[in-house]
């Protein structure tokens, strides 16, 4: 599978499927390019699909000092340029939202649409605060197969899925605390009041069991992004693309049809 070097880091990516339009899937902190297998199976007949490992993750392994979220757009643009792709639709989970939202704001000509799944990305507003339930978050960290990245009910209803998520995540080889630290240090947040000319079709997706970015927070933030849609998938946790892929994929198809 292809590798390319971008600013000192070897970035791993894969190209699948067929179709005139391209979907780029940007994973979160608990995943890597392999985590999107349910979406790959759903969309590869109709779209060209790019999945990749963010710098520092899995097959794009590098020293933690080279993990810089401000470089996410450079990495994906390098992939698009190599594959001679002018623009794409970005589907972003959690940390991947920092890739898609930076692309939408700073390289909008290359973004046909943006799905922000359980993530604020770089967007913020002083009146919209992420008020996490600290006690619930702490109770969501237990044995090796329990993680706040999955809904509190997921392990009991799909132990095989919980094990698979843990196995894929285990390939990343990262220090978890590095991610929020580097995001904060990058200072790439953008007050949504500044989005006066924002015109990228955007959909925020969330679920009621998300402990990391609660649904009420995502809904309030989405209302501050011009033209953005909002979808709550109900009783699902932080990783709806993995926990309830059929419903997640259905919402993606609705969005794709609209744009």
Image (spheres, helix red, strand yellow):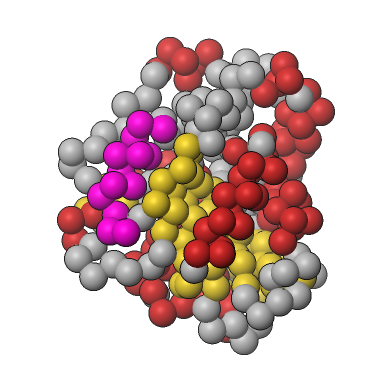
Residue 157 percent location from the top left of the image: 73, 20
Seen in the picture, residue 202 relative to 9 is either above or below; the reply is above
Residue 190 percent location from the top left of the image: 26, 56
Q: Main secondary structure of the magenta part?
A: helix
Q: For the image shown, how many numbered marks are present on the structure?
A: 0
Left or right: residue 149 compared with residue 172? left
Residue 65 percent location from the top left of the image: 49, 54
Please state, as top left, top right, bottom left or bottom right, where the N terminus lies in the image: bottom right
Left or right: residue 102 compared with residue 96? left
The quadrant holding residue 71 is bottom left
What residue is at 46 percent from the left and 43 percent from the top?
A: 231
What residue is at 56 percent from the left and 63 percent from the top?
A: 256
Left or right: residue 185 compared with residue 87? left
Please say whether residue 1 is one of the residues in the magenta stretch.
no
Q: Which residues are magenta?
A: 215-227
Please say whether residue 217 is one of the residues in the magenta stretch.
yes
Residue 104 percent location from the top left of the image: 39, 67
What residue is at 61 percent from the left and 57 percent from the top?
A: 253
The quadrant holding residue 19 is bottom right
Viewer-proximal residue among 245 and 188:
245
What residue is at 41 percent from the left and 64 percent from the top?
A: 201
Seen in the picture, residue 213 relative to 91 is either above or below; the reply is above
């Amino acid at each position: 599978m292809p590798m390319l070097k971008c600013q000192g880091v070897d970035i791993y990516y894969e190209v699948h499927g067929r179709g005139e339009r391209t979907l780029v899937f940007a994973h979160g902190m608990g995943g890597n390019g392999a985590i999107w297998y349910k979406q790959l199976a759903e969309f590869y007949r109709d779209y060209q699909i790019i999945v990749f490992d963010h710098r520092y993750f899995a097959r794009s392994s590098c020293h933690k000092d080279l993990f810089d979220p401000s470089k996410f757009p450079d990495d994906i643009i390098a992939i698009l340029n190599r594959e001679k792709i002018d623009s794409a639709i970005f589907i972003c989970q959690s940390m991947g939202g920092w890739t898609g939202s930076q692309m939408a704001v700073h390289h909008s000509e290359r973004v046909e649409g943006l799905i922000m799944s359980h993530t604020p990305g770089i967007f913020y507003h002083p009146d919209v605060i992420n008020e996490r339930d600290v006690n619930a978050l702490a109770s969501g960290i237990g044995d090796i197969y329990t993680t706040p990245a999955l809904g509190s009910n997921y392990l009991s209803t799909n132990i095989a899925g919980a094990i698979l998520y843990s196995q894929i995540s285990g390939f990343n080889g990262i220090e978890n605390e590095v991610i929020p630290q580097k995001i904060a240090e990058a200072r790439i947040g953008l007050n949504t009041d500044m989005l006066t000319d924002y015109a990228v079709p955007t959909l925020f997706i969330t679920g009621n069991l998300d402990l990391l970015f609660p649904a009420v927070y995502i809904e309030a933030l989405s209302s501050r992004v011009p033209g953005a849609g909002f979808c709550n998938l109900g009783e699902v946790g932080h990783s709806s693309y993995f926990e309830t892929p059929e419903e997640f994929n259905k919402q993606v198809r609705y969005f794709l049809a609209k744009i």
